[in-house]
Image (cartoon, grey):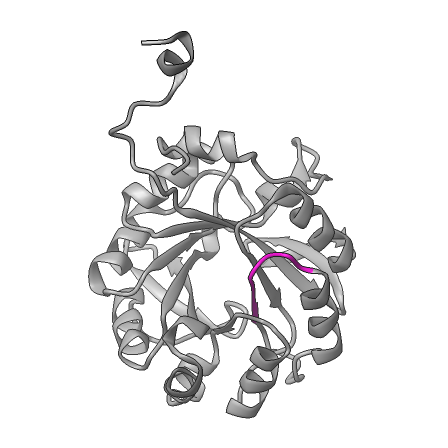
Amino acid sequence: MTAYEDELPPLNLPRRRPRVIPVLLLKGGLLHKPKQFSAPKYVGDPRVAVKIFNDKGADELALLDMTATTERREPDFALIEEIVSESLMPIAYGGGIRTYEQAARILELGVEKVILNSALVEVPDLSERIANVFGAQSVIGCLDCRKSFLGGYKSYVGAGQRSTGMKPEDLARKVAARGVGEIIVQAIDREGVGNGYDLALIKRVADAVDVPVIALGGARTPADFKQATDAGAAAAAAGSMFVFNGPHRAVLITYPTDEQLHAAFGTRDA
């Protein structure tokens, strides 16, 4: 064995690593990042952030307009088109989508996936209509979840303001049956806090459905990504980790290197 061969990762390591997805939140056309769905802090211009994530080779990017639904606004199609034109990554967009026509327009602009939250319960046939035309891979259901005092979980819509009255796993089963190709599971209590994903919540939802689950809410280091996938997630997403640095939450847009992610997941390049 040569010295070079001795440095290679073991051949029995899995080749493909799970996806790691930055999540950017829009408010008034600019990026903001809240903590536990409140007190959003200004982060910057989404166009600049997209260029940085391009340069750093992010796997995908999720863009969410956090006030479009509560303000009863349509998606900002012009901004979405501009961001897509700048991006070298697959883009998923959510916020303000209530009709098939809106979803179709977004996908025709070059967005690869639309993300539905409130529409999952308010327009229950929407996800299936989109999937029937564009394919299930084009639709993501986003479940915002909060832990109750008694230890159970409830799912919410409308930026975490309205309870659906359903457990996350029950809502996940419903939306999976209606055509969504992936499900984001976001822990409201851990959003922006950096104390790790809610692994019990991830496992509940992942065990309930056959579609891939994306963990969101609580990541602080790449090691958290591995814990999320060990709990059943197919991919890991994060917001604050990629836009803030240090205890004072100074704005610094970053993304782990491929080597760092392989080390965290215990994978290697094909």
**Whole-percent x and y of residue 115?**
50, 71
Point out the image quarter for the N terminus: top left
Residue at the front extreme, as displayed: 2
Q: Is residue 88 above or below residue 2?
A: below
Point out the image quarter for the C terminus: top left
Residue at the left extreme, as displayed: 207
Quick check: can you spot residue 41? no
Quick check: can you spot residue 173? yes
Q: Quadrant of residue 8?
A: top left
Of the pair 80 and 141, the residue shown nearer to us:
80
Of the pair 230 and 135, the residue shown nearer to us:
135
Inspect the magenta stretch and tell me whether residue 92 lies in it.
yes
Q: Give the magenta part as a residue range.
A: 87-93
**Whole-percent x and y of residue 121?**
40, 82
Q: Quadrant of residue 105?
A: bottom right
**Whole-percent x and y of residue 33?**
65, 54
Inspect the magenta stretch and tell me whether residue 44 lies in it.
no
**Whole-percent x and y of residue 230?**
28, 41
Q: Residue at x 60, y 79 (%)?
A: 106
Q: Residue at x 21, y 58 (%)?
A: 207
Q: Residue at x 72, y 39 (%)?
A: 252
Q: Is residue 193 above or below residue 118?
A: above
Counting labels gives 0
Q: Is residue 100 above or below residue 187?
A: below
Of the pair 135 and 179, the residue shown nearer to us:
135
Q: Is residue 157 left or right of residue 268?
A: right
